[in-house]
Amino acid sequence: MPVEEDLYHALTAYTLQLRDRGFLHQHVVDAFAVQSADETSKTIGVAFALIGLYLHVDKGFTGRQVQRVHMQLARRRRKWPRLELPGARGRLTVADVMAAPPGAERDAKIEEWCTAVWGSCGGCREQVVELLTTELNVS
């Protein structure tokens, strides 16, 4: 994981320097959190990352909009359920994203990565939608 973590940190530095209105950085954080989660991961981190990917991939939310939902959720609930993740979480990794040249190609690869990670977590979709409906009346 150290190599992947180094690549993740390089990617977050890249997305933060973009200073884009949509806040692409949030999607990187969510995709990596889901893909690298294990039994020691905090339930809130996994839940928020899955919610973020759902809102982005299925609902078209920007990273900034996802961030606002995360803030609303953090104020409402203190205990988060453990969501069961599949063993394989997408065919793309942070290494694939970083292999793309900076700019439009890397940004597109981030989108592809998010879609692949969320697509692998279809078994969590119902729980994610239920959490959003229960907590914020959003689905």
Image: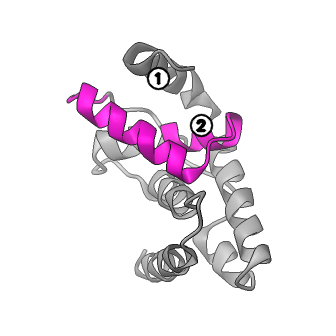
User: For the image shown, how many numbered marks are present on the structure?
Assistant: 2
Query: Which image quarter holds the N terminus?
Result: bottom left
Instruction: Pick out the residue farthest to the left.
Output: 78
Q: Could you tell whether 22 is left or right of 104 in the image?
A: left
Label 1 neighbour load within 10 Å: few <14, some 14-19, many 20+: some
**Rendered residue at 35%/47% (across/down):** 45
Q: From which residue to which does the magenta span run?
A: 51-80
In the rendered image, residue 67, in percent from the top left (x then y), is placed at 44, 47
Q: Amino acid at mark 1?
A: Leu
Q: Is residue 83 above or below residue 63?
A: above
Depth check: 129 or 72 in front? 72
Q: Could you tell whether 130 is left or right of 93 in the image?
A: left
- Estimate the spatial distance between the alpha carbons at disc 2 and disc 1, rounded to whole Å: 10 Å
Q: Please say whether residue 64 is one of the residues in the magenta stretch.
A: yes
User: Which residue corresponds to mark 2?
Assistant: 54
Q: Which mark is residue 132?
A: 1
Query: Which image quarter holds the C terminus?
Result: top right
**Rendered residue at 55%/52% (across/down):** 63
Helix, strand or loop at mark 1: helix
**Rendered residue at 31%/50% (across/down):** 41
Q: Which numbered disc flags the more N-terminal residue, 2 or 1?
A: 2
Q: Are marks 2 and 1 in contact (CB under 8 Å)?
A: yes
- State the image quarter where residue 68 is shown: top left
